[in-house]
Amino acid sequence: MNSDHSCCIIGATCNVSHEEVDCSACGLDPMCLVLDYAERGSGVPEGILLRRQPVAMGENLYRAQQAFEAVYAIKSGSFKAYIEEQDGKERVVGFYFAGDLMGAEAIAGQTYPCSVRALEPSRVCMLHLGQLVNSGRPLEALQAALINMLGKEVALNHQVTSALVRQNAEQRLAAFLISLSERMQSRGFSPCGIELRMSRSDIGSYLGLARETVSRLLTKFQHCGLILLRKKQLLLLDSQGLRQLAFL
Amino acid sequence: MNSDHSCCIIGATCNVSHEEVDCSACGLDPMCLVLDYAERGSGVPEGILLRRQPVAMGENLYRAQQAFEAVYAIKSGSFKAYIEEQDGKERVVGFYFAGDLMGAEAIAGQTYPCSVRALEPSRVCMLHLGQLVNSGRPLEALQAALINMLGKEVALNHQVTSALVRQNAEQRLAAFLISLSERMQSRGFSPCGIELRMSRSDIGSYLGLARETVSRLLTKFQHCGLILLRKKQLLLLDSQGLRQLAFL
DNA sequence: CGAGAGATTGATACCAATCAAAGGATGTGG
DNA sequence: CCACATCCTTTGATTGGTATCAATCTCTCG
């Protein structure tokens, strides 16, 4: 919020995308703790939690229609969720960053409804939920943690949906940037320096805008002094101004 | 889907809004079963689950900013979730019908992010989650059920969001009608006869359209022979046609 | 019956998609 | 190391869909 906060995206002192979230900011954290505790006890099911698995850029974590297997927490990097349309094009339905949980939307239907692909080299922790449920160990703390995370995602989705539908292009993009900033901040990253790993087309697809419109608005925001943009490095100069744009 | 299915909304033989969902179609069903089972055992915490509480039309189940207390399952009737804007207007963020779960979005933040109001006289079951977690009984089955429901809601939200943003007014409204039909069918009601308890303004607010646009499109759909509309009674004549409108 | 809210229908203005073209960035092979 | 191809991005001109303003109509309820 305050610009005395050290923002170093242009000078590239800190490259956010190569840092890992601390376990305390990670979506799977409560689960990890529970599993750690369990592992100190007796019979530990092997391979239920795979930590810090590398994922190559462009690699798919899972694809639409696949049977549900696991939920994933992002340790570092970023991902996009998308759906293949019948015309072959892909529609982006979400972006995920370090600390986010992915795959929860497949729990109920036991099938992933969308595909998820890495936007850069990343690392994820993988929790095999199916195996876990059958493992016969007490699960209360773990389940409570999962319930909390799901509740969080539901709440976020509520916000995003209602915001997107009602707002015009300018408001949508401003809200998108603000939400990115807040998500970064909640994970201990700088709230004003953000690396936009996704393309303008991806952003447009997510916000329901043409890529040309995204481009136009970004330059407009820059001319207004709201942001600074160098390639994929984004600097929020006036998040207050963006907030005002987003909600009116 | 087939119109040989008896649809009686004009003749008013069956008034959907006054029927209750069977427990097996209700959002809280697995929980009810678990609690029933527990109650047959020893020390049962009193008042954790309040069944079939009546809610008057226009009454608020909970309001934005209130502390999280319980989740609710609708036995009969319908509700709208909305947010008060700073200009005093309300933005609708969702509709809920018999069998739906409400309040899950407050679990993580322990505060309701939106208000929920009855669109007609209704009945709900109320599960005091906070008390339950502290009651010290084995909760695995209950939690598993809640996880499933939340996963379902996340998946649904994903769909709705991405659909709403990208589609034009005609597609949005067609998709909205289809989704209503599917939700009704999944709860054992007729998929073609639906009572629209909410106003055109509410629908417009939810879909991000002006009420005039909603009105225009409904009459257009009627002229195309897709639907039949008498006041608040809606009859889907050609759900295939609506589906085609929605996805292209 | 009258009042007020909700719904419908018409005319106009504006925002954003689309079409079109040029300008950068990145990577590959000669 | 440069030439070329490809992809992403930016900017401009035109078109169409939808909000908005305005008027009338319908229904409900006291």
Image (tube, coloured by chain):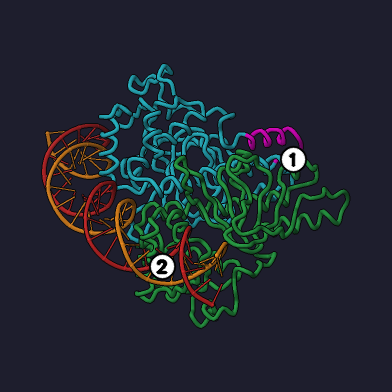
Chain colours: A green, B cyan, C orange, D red
Q: Is residue B43 magenta?
A: yes
Indicate the secondary structure of the residue bearing disc 1: loop
Image quadrant in which you'd find residue B110? bottom right
Q: Is residue A184 above or below residue A91?
A: below
Q: B69 or B195: which is nearer to us?
A: B195
Crowding around mark 1 (Cα neighbors within 10 Å: few <14, some 14 to 19, many 20+) is: few
The amino acid type, in three-letter code, at marker 2 is: Arg
Q: Which residue is mark 1?
A: B43
Indicate the secondary structure of the residue bearing disc 2: helix
The amino acid type, in three-letter code, at marker 1 is: Gly
Q: Chain of mark 1?
A: B
Residue shown at the point (44%, 76%) measured from the top left: A237
Q: Which mark is residue A243?
A: 2
Q: Chain of mark 2?
A: A
Crowding around mark 2 (Cα neighbors within 10 Å: few <14, some 14 to 19, many 20+) is: some
Q: Is D13 on the left or on the right of B34, as rendered?
A: left
Quadrant including the C terminus of chain A: bottom left
Q: What span is in magenta?
A: B30-44
